[in-house]
Image (cartoon, rainbow, N blue to C red):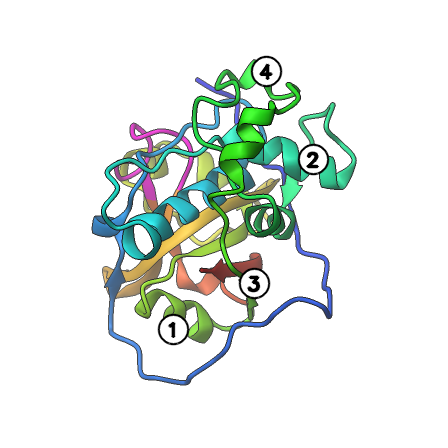
Amino acid sequence: MTERKYLNKPDKQDNRDLLFAVRGVATPYEVDLRPKDAAGIFDQGYLGSCTANAICAFVSYLDKNFTYPSRLHFNYSVLFLYWKEREIEGTIDYDSGAYIRDGMKVAQKIGLAAGGTYPTEVSEFRSTPTQEAYDTAKHHKITEYRRLNANTPAQLKESLANGFPVVMGIEIYSSFEGDEVALTGVVPMPDRQSETFLGGHAVLAMGYTHIDGKEYIICRNSWGKGWGDKGYFYLPMDFVGRMISDMWTGR
């Protein structure tokens, strides 16, 4: 069994961030963007590259549904983005994790490199990007990214209802690694007093639904298709305002 790392760094508040523009429209009872997902479920292995995995999946989704709807494949180099995140943060030699904001910044200013232009083996995560990687990245940028209010579900639901997934940083406790979660994808609300805090994890919110009368966020993970519900999981909506550090979307 792969030993997982939880290395998403919680957001540092920055007054320069663009904020999500709230329209205050009524949102549906449930939203599920999984049928529109573009990239196959990734597996980050033992590397702490969750931010890059979530953002590459996010941009692939934008490509399929908004930017390049006629294309068949949406494959970006996760490790190129992870390297660029660590370059910003001064940690390129270490598996240090990253801030979601820095990954979104790379996606806007540098772009995402095409798969195959950077090594895919996690052991090569320190490799310096090639010029070919940079040349492909400049053609695959997002135009903007915005921070959502992580203290209320309103903006999360509005973004999802408008067809835009949300990259989130969540707190992980020991129950997340339980056998039942690995089998069903249904995450329990952690007991902070009795459970061990394991770290931060970046995931991609793809909708929200109800299970046994309780509301859950549909999330795309990066642990392969064999984990959870075909690589997705269901996070209690009660995490919002309690155990979600930051939320981001863009276009």
| Quadrant in the picture for the N terminus | top left
Residue 231 among those drawn in magenta: yes
Element under disc 2 = helix
Q: x, y (%) of residue 133?
A: 54, 28
Residue placed under numbered mark 4 in the picture: 124
* Depth check, front residue: 144 or 242: 144
Is the residue marked by circle 3 packed among few (<14), some (14-19), or many (20+) residues within 10 Å? few
**CA neighbours of label 2 inside 10 A, class few (<14), some (14 to 19), many (20+):** many
Which residue position is annotated with label 1? 158
Q: Residue at x 52, y 18 (%)?
A: 119
The x, y position of residue 46, in whole percent, is: 54, 22
Q: Which residue is mark 2?
A: 86
Q: Are marks 2 and 1 in contact (CB under 8 Å)?
A: no
Tell me the chief SS of the magenta region: loop
- The numbered dot on residue 213 is none
Q: Residues within 10 Å of mark 4 (few under 14, many from 20)?
A: few
> 83 left or right of 170?
right
Circle nearer the N terminus (3, 2): 2
Q: Mark number for residue 242?
A: 3
Expressed as whole percent of the image width and height from the top left, the position of residue 98 reads 65, 41
Bounds of the magenta span?
A: 221-232
Residue 16 occupies quadrant: bottom right
How far apart are the two marked residues, 2 and 4, measured between alpha carbons?
Answer: 14 Å
Residue 72, quarter of the rendered image = top left
Q: Quadrant of the C terminus?
A: bottom left
Instruction: State the CA–CA distance, disc 2 to disc 1.
Output: 31 Å
Query: Contact (CB < 8 A) between labels 1 and 4?
Result: no
Marks 2 and 4 close (CB-CB < 8 Å): no
Kind of residue at badge 1: Glu
**Mark 1 neighbour class, 10 Å CA radius: few under 14, some 14 to 19, many 20 or more:** many
